[in-house]
Image (cartoon, rainbow, N blue to C red):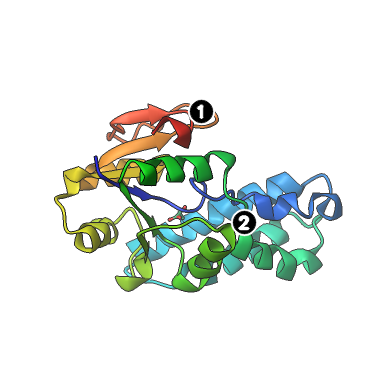
Amino acid sequence: MSIFVFDAYGTLFDVHAAIGRFRDKAGPDADRMSDIWRTKQLEYSWTLTMAGRYAPFWTLTERALDFALARVPSVDKALKPQLLQAYFNLDAFPDARAALRTLKGKGHKTGILSNGSPDMLEPLVRHSGLRFDAVLSVDAVKIFKPAPQAYQLAVEKFGVPKERIGFVSSNFWDAAGAKSFGFHVFWINRGGVVGERLGFQPDRVLRSLGEL
Ligand code: 2OP
């Protein structure tokens, strides 16, 4: 495997870092609100895709936060701009930096393939200081992962057969979609959670990016 393509949110970057910075102000339902925010963000992307529609992931991130704040009224709605702003410099997971350095040191190429729109990914990657050979957004084809057209972007960018690309994701739905597409898939199961039964299994299950 000489090319490793990573999912961004939840794999390299911690989506719950946003609420983490405001947990005191957000109160006891902070984590529940953040879980709903993430769940709806993804659900909206799949629903639009199935309806044959597309809106940038940033728009869906904002709409999902509006829903989550409405659903969990104990969290102060005034936090909305700060929570959105935090999305531009989410913390990278502690294992990401060392893993990327090791892969590069071994001569591997690395990339990101994310549902995130370019205006989200550009500042996120810049603030993190992480370096990639390519940062690809599905916005180029205006359809979200796990649609095959989205994964095809990485094949076109790196110009190799898909089975030679190692695709790395902590999101099982993404790992399953990537396997269905034909990538060699690593599912990063940091929490040791039960795998989904979607009919596609990752090639390897790892506990951290450091095991790549
Ligand atoms: C991604 O970065 C949304 O986590 C998903 O593509």
Q: Residue at x 48, y 45 (%)?
A: 11
Coordinates of residue 137 in the picture (x, y in percent): 38, 65
Corner quadrant of residue 40: bottom right
Cβ(mark 2) to ligand 1 < 8 Å? Answer: no
Coordinates of residue 56 in the picture (x, y in percent): 45, 72
Name the residue that disc number 1 marks: 193
Q: Secondary structure at mark 2?
A: loop
Q: Residue at x 45, y 71 (%)?
A: 118
Name the residue that disc number 2 marks: 90
Corner quadrant of residue 112: bottom left
Nearer to us: label 2 or label 1: 2
> Is 74 displayed left or right of 11 in the figure?
right
> Is 57 displayed left or right of 2 in the figure?
right
Which amino acid type is shown beneath numbered disc 1?
A: Val
Q: Is residue 130 above or below residue 198?
A: below
Q: Quadrant of ligand 1?
A: bottom left
Q: Is residue 212 above or below residue 8?
A: above
Q: Is residue 208 above or below residue 139?
A: above
Q: Secondary structure at mark 1?
A: loop
> Is 108 displayed left or right of 13 in the figure?
left
